[in-house]
Image (cartoon, helix red, strand yellow):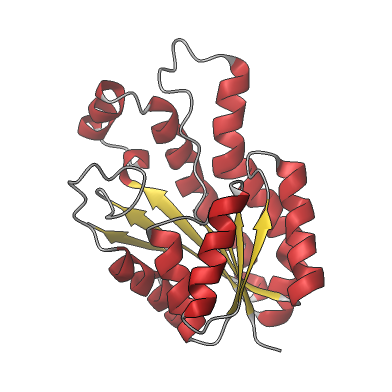
Amino acid sequence: MAPTALIAGFGPGISTAVAERFGKAGFQLALVARNAERLSAGAKALEAKGFKAKAFSADLSDPARVRAVVDQVHRELGKISVLHWNAYGSGANDLLTADAAELRAAMDIGTTSLLMAVQEALVDLKDTKGSVLVTNGGLGLFDSKLDAMAVQFGSMGLAMVNSAKHKLVGLLAKRLEKDAIYVGEVMVLGVVKGTAFDRGQGGLDPVKIAEKFWELHANRAAVYAQVG
């Protein structure tokens, strides 16, 4: 059976390019996101290009549902060799007015649900000596100019979660290296063409970002990479 790549937070842009890159390498593709209609269209588009893809609808802000969908992918497609976490929470834009539920939802989709997905796929990842690949954004870096930008554009929650996600990647990389599981992150420093953030000014090519993810997976050396 072909190896399985689970792509969580599937949509236009980075995740579609990652799906095609891993599909070209012989992976079957499990596409996970909340929007069932978009998922179905994405799976059909990938199949039209000759890839094996299947849609799995799930709310990735719900850690319990994340565990359930990872188990479903395992049962229907076999062992998971690659877990790509492309999901992000965009709530809590102003940390001084966000309520506790909004803060928890943002943190859950960026970190807690990612960790639950890793836990649920852990046996598969150990058996296949697999990879956990994480998309992150530059607002998570510790930089006063980026902090000012996050405040100006109402992206404080996203910046906070990205920072926590960045630390989580490093912790997982150290924790899982003894099991020969690779963990890596691509930090995207700019607007990606074709994504929800693109208002016509997107300058980063998602295909190049997908290739960077493939390099991390194939070389299994550096934990962090940046594009942009």
Residue 8 appears in the rendering: no
Examine the rendering and report whether any part of residue 129 can be seen.
yes
The single residue placed furthest to the top in the displayed view is 97
Height in image: 177 above or below 164?
Answer: below
Horizontal and vertical percent position of residue 146: 25, 34
Quadrant into which the C terminus falls: bottom left
Nearest to the observer: residue 197 or residue 38: 38
Q: Is residue 46 left or right of residue 125?
A: left
Residue at screen point 46% across, 10% down: 97
Answer with the quarter of the image where residue 159 lies.
top left
The count of marks equals: 0
User: For this rendering, which residue is in front, 37 or 203?
Assistant: 37
Relative to 35, say whether 80 is above or below. below
Where residue 49 sits: x, y (%)?
46, 81
Vertical side of 35 occupied by 134: above or below: below
Quarter of the picture containing the N terminus is bottom right
Residue 107: x and y, percent? 57, 34
Residue 192 percent location from the top left of the image:
28, 53
| Vertical placement of residue 121 versus 194, above or below | below
Near-viewer residue (189 or 38) = 38
Left or right of 212? Residue 41 is right
Residue at 27% of width from left, 55% of height from top? 193
Task: Name the residue rendered at 49%, 40% in the picture.
Answer: 164
